[in-house]
Image: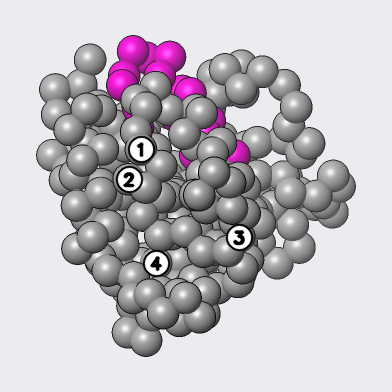
Amino acid sequence: MVKAVKGVFVAGTDTGVGKTLVATLLLRAFGTRGWRTAAMKPVAAGAHRRSGAWINSDVERLRAAASVRSPRTVVNPYCFAPPVAPHIAAAEAGVSISLPHIREAYRKLALSADIVVVEGAGGLLVPLGARSDAADIVRALALPVVLVVGLRLGCINHALLTVAALQARGLRLAGWIGNCVVPRMARRAENIEALRQRIAAPLLGIVPHGVGGDPQTLARGLDLGPLIRFVSERKLN
């Protein structure tokens, strides 16, 4: 059992690369180790109204995978109806996305969890407002990043640009996970090897295309040893 609350931030090389899938697998994997897990998606865009609340499908998947049950408004402080970039959705709703508000929601989740898995929205540099982007959430929460790379044509460039952005902002990359977002990718193994050679952080696993198996089995397929050592050796917010 961990002795202090830890957290990781799941970022993606783009939208639609499988951040939610990977975040739920991480929650399951940490849970199998007896850790109390909490999930968070600070900003979500694309929701429908149900019983007076905005419901986002990714947020519901994260809540179902976590062992700590938390109010939806804490797990997801900002939820917008249209599936568009967060800064556009927020502006249309007349809302300003506040980093202190996100930090406070994270603090509440951390009170009852051993680890909090936080999923970003879109890519790392998607804007939240006129002067902020998703990378600022990583900085505000002082979390290491697990990068989800959507394995498809162009993934090498997308991944290396995201890693460069992380490094330029002084953010910590704990590892990366490849997600096979297309059924067939030419030279997939060669692309993965190119990424392994160019990304200093460890490869934590490859998620096969069309995942439909048992999440617990899939979670066990991840090599989380390096990630667990990373978060356990650091006292995080």
Q: Amino acid at mark 2?
A: Val
Indicate whether 133 appears above or below 235. below
Asked whether residue 230 is in view, the answer is no
Residue under label 2, please give it.
Answer: 74
In magenta, the rendered stretch is 21-38
**Alpha-carbon span between mark 3 and mark 2:** 18 Å
Residue under label 1, please give it.
Answer: 71
Q: Nearer the viewer, mark 3 or mark 4?
A: 3
Q: Verify CB contact (< 8 Å) between mark 4 and mark 2.
A: no
Task: Judge the density around disc 4: few (<14), some (14-19), many (≥20) Cα neighbours within 10 Å.
Answer: many
Task: Judge the density around disc 3: few (<14), some (14-19), many (≥20) Cα neighbours within 10 Å.
Answer: some
Asked whether residue 37 is in view, the answer is yes
Mark 2 lies on a secondary structure that is helix
**Alpha-carbon span between mark 1 and mark 2:** 5 Å
Tell me which secondary structure the magenta stretch mostly adopts: helix
Mark 1 lies on a secondary structure that is loop
Picture coordinates of residue 15 (x, y %)? 61, 62
**Alpha-carbon span between mark 3 and mark 4:** 17 Å
